[in-house]
Image: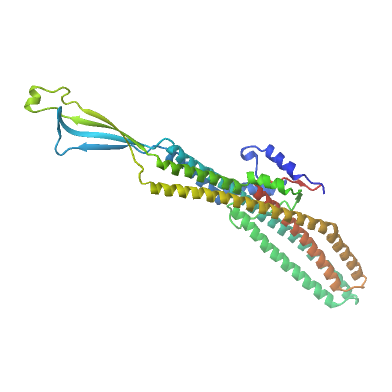
Amino acid sequence: MNAIKLAGALLATLGTAQAGAEQADYATHGDEALGALIGEALDRNPRIRTALAEHAAAREIVPQVTALPDPRVAVTGFGRQPETRVGPQRGGLAVTQAIPWFGKLAARGDVATSEAALRDEFVDAVRADIVARVKSAYYDLAYQDEAIRITTQQEELLRHYESLARAQYSQGIGLQQAVVKLQAQITRALNRRTDLQRRRATAEATLNVLRDRPVDSAITETGGLERPVVDIDIAALRGVAREASPDAKAAALAIDSAQAGLRLAQRRYWPDVVVGAGWANVAGRRDDAGRSNPPPDNGKDTLNFTVGVNIPVFRSSIDAGVREAQARVSAAREAHRGTLLDVDLAIRTIGLELTTVDEQIALYENALLQQAEQALRSTEEAYSTGTTGVLDLLDSEEVLLEVRLGLTRLETDYLKALARMERAIGRAFPARRQP
């Protein structure tokens, strides 16, 4: 089998990526029905909408934490007006403004911005999860459709055998037992199809929930199980995943957020500044001496200005906050390492699964299926001539059925593994159709 070299395809994918909706982080391998279901799920899924709302809320925190505190206004009145050289003070007004020390507001903004970026990455992770779940349910649905088709063909074949057995029995060259056994096998086929239809309804309901539709909405069309084939380059996949995986990117952003929190905690050692301005209303001298010889600026209102700082003397709480922030940085770094290991493990495991399933499919297609079909044809010929019994015929028919269903299941497993690999690397998984 000639297949695209995965490393080159990955580089091409990354080099031609476009911003926005033009570049999808998932592959449909030309399946329009699957693409429509994924698009609908991305637009309507409640989990995605929740993540988007949480990201929008996180963005609005930035202007809140970077704004100056509200100024304070104080009004002063006197029960007994104090006398001054230029007259009694009747009242006053003062305005103060706290100003965090240089860099504190920026540090708060960095923390909030990092949290918003992390929430944005969570949105991508949720989207990737939903796409993977849609694909898994869709391939299950496609498997049930194909299995129902195969089972229906089996039922038709068994009914043909039954009519043949009836004819032989009526001619006195067959046994009634053969007819009964074939009828029992037909009943088994009907029961199998009923179970497949039940499983199909479950897969259909799962897809409806993922795209926020009523669970009983009908999905009548699937694109089948067209299987693309790729060569697996674990090293190339790991390199892409470490940069593109939503989980890895979120873990890296968590480190940035923790480091921003550490910078903010360290700035608590610095004092904040408070500036203020005050105005006092002076009534003017009304005593005899003041009226006869008013002093300069008699009755003139006064203005005053103040500058102050808080003194961070209780350093034990600040020290504890810094230690807490340092521990969070360490925890975020370890979590990042753990996430990368999980990604590596997923790629390794799924890569081996894809290789193994591909080999099994080749065995089924190139040997088992042909052998089962040939065995059934030989048994049919022997049964028609009376040299073999119905049990041999049923055994050959059952073997072919199991081979066909097994091949269909392997093709489904392969497609589902591709979807999981796509989720692990965070990019549309490059592939081409079989020639």
The one of 218 and 410 positioned closer to us in this rendering: 410
Residue at left 66%, top 51%?
344
Give x and y (percent) for residue 330. Answer: 53, 49
The one of 394 and 340 positioned closer to us in this rendering: 340
Relative to 356, say whether 181 is above or below. below
Q: For residue 175, what is the image quadrant?
A: bottom right
Residue at left 83%, top 77%?
177
Give x and y (percent) for residue 200. Answer: 67, 60
Relative to 269, say whether 180 is above or below. below
The reply to whether residue 221 is visible in this rendering is no
What colouring style does the render use?
Answer: rainbow
Give x and y (percent) for residue 46. Answer: 55, 51
**Number of callouts:** 0
The one of 362 and 232 positioned closer to us in this rendering: 232
Give x and y (percent) for residue 206. Answer: 62, 57
Residue at left 76%, top 63%?
151
The reply to whether residue 150 is visible in this rendering is yes
Q: Is residue 267 left or right of residue 330?
A: left
Q: Is residue 90 left or right of residue 385?
A: left
Q: For residue 118, what is the image quadrant?
A: top right
The one of 393 and 269 positioned closer to us in this rendering: 269
Query: Extreme left residue here?
Result: 288
Q: Is residue 110 left or right of residue 274?
A: right
Q: Is residue 286 left or right of residue 234?
A: left
